[in-house]
Image: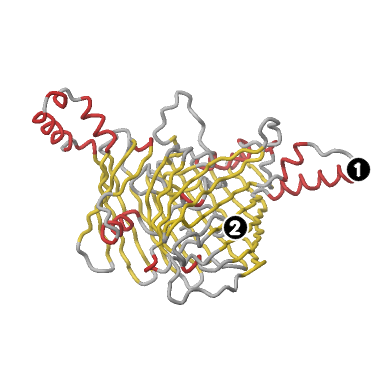
Amino acid sequence: MNRLRWVGEGDIWELDKSTPVTLEATARAVSNDPLPLGLSRGTRLSRPKQAEFFHRFMATPLIPSFSPLAGGLSLQKVLTFPFPNNWFVSLLGQFDVQRFVSEVKKSEAFVRGSASRLSTLGKQLKDKSLYALGFCSELLLTPEDTLLLSYDTYKCDPNKNPRAKAVFNHKFPLHNLTAEAVWPGLYVDKEGEYWDVPFSMAIDLASLPAESGLSYHLCLHHNSGSPKKFSSVDAVEVPPPASLLPGLSLKSAFSYRANMDLWRGITPKLEACKPYDIFLSSPHVSVSGIIGSVMTAAFGENSIRTKLEKDSEGVGGFSLHLPSVNSGFMADALGRASLTAQYGNFQKLFFDLTRFHARLDFPHGLRFLTGATSVAQELLNSRQPSLEAFQKICPEVSVSLQQQIVGPFSLRAESGIQIDLKNEGNPVTIHNATFAIEYALQVLASAKAVAWYSPKQREFMIELRFYET
């Protein structure tokens, strides 16, 4: 369902985002909204399997996470059941530390004496409202087929409904097929706001990721019920993204990718020392480009998105809305250009890895073409182009920086750069910054434990990732 790659080097399609607001720890992207960035992306490995790995191999009996929407600081622990090797069954428990401390401080008996304090602590620990439980079953039906079933219940928050999910995956020789049903479905928009859709179902067929060449993606998606903001406390009701409204949509996307090395290091590696990550062991400078198109046919309330969004701001693309049959069609081109520079082989003990990545996204090709044509005409006629025309050709910018500190530990930062030429006082702003500490698991060739923090959303999470560069 998603790829774990350095931001910008993976698929151009929407990816799941890691988040500690639910036990499942993932949220899908709102259609047409890019995610906050790669550090907080979801992983292929389910949350219970990640927790089991931390317990067994990294001496971490309790896994911390933090999110204001989840009640603050929480601790997680997983229990696995002895079943055959092709069947993983687990029970993931979460303890609300912040609420526990708050309830203990409120207790009058806690203030009296040591005996009363112990009794108060024991009583509070028995409070079911401090716990959340998640049941997960992952069954390997065949070498190519897997079935995941999960059910999460939240005693700690009576306003949270139980969450259920069923996912079927099939691996074709050159494609991946995924069928998914979730109720409710958790989505995140480009502003980092979370939305619950009462029932969401999708069938997704994607070509296998490739370093270059053609790739494509087909998705049939159905939403049912009125979406609402996740744990909303706002006095003013905010309208949901149009693509989350009830209805059926069929999306097809095609892209072509090309890569080119500007420089590739020839310094020999240390034979007596294995790289901490085999995918980060080659210094280089490279560029890549992607061009493609996306077409969407929508049937239902979600088909009115072209009328709700700000076309005057250049949402762009071709759109057709048919109110008589409550349907619509949208199509647009897209493009991406990126630069990656790495120094070091990630073998030595200190400062042997410095990696920088910059990405320019052009998600609305027609808007860019219109703006570029307008700017060219104005310059040919010796006139100054308008700010609106320049704004249309401004890309969405993302940058990443990773630096080894000592041994397998490295620091990483990612951020988006927003360009708003109409804001004369501050036309360039940084948004959605994310910071992380990574610990490379050298014995697994390319795996890492990542502890990341998002200041904007005030979210903290520790997770496990494989084969990410």
Q: Secondary structure at mark 2?
A: strand
Graded by Cα atoms within 10 Å as few (under 14), some (14 to 19) or many (20 or more), the crowding at tag 2 reads many
Query: In the figure, 66 relative to 442: above or below?
Result: above
What residue lies at 64% left-to-right and 51% top-to-bottom? 361
Q: Position of residue 260 (x, y in %)?
A: 66, 67
Q: CA distance from mark 2 to mark 1?
A: 37 Å
Viewer-nearest of discs 2 and 1: 1
Q: How is the image coloured?
A: secondary structure
Based on the displayed image, in which of its 4 quarters is residue 377 positioned?
top right
Q: Position of residue 30 (x, y in %)?
A: 51, 45
Q: Position of residue 309 (x, y in %)?
A: 62, 37
Q: Nearer the viewer, residue 142 or 46?
A: 46
Tell me which label, 2 or 1, sits earlier in the chain.
Answer: 2
Q: Residue furthest front?
A: 350
Determine whether, in the image, residue 70 is placed left or right of residue 363: left
Q: Secondary structure at mark 1?
A: loop
What residue lies at 59% left-to-right and 64% top-to-bottom? 215
- For badge 2, the amino acid type reads Ala
Query: In the figure, 275 relative to 363: above or below?
Result: below
Count of residue discs: 2
Name the mark on residue 381: 1
Name the mark on residue 253: 2
Graded by Cα atoms within 10 Å as few (under 14), some (14 to 19) or many (20 or more), the crowding at tag 1 reads few
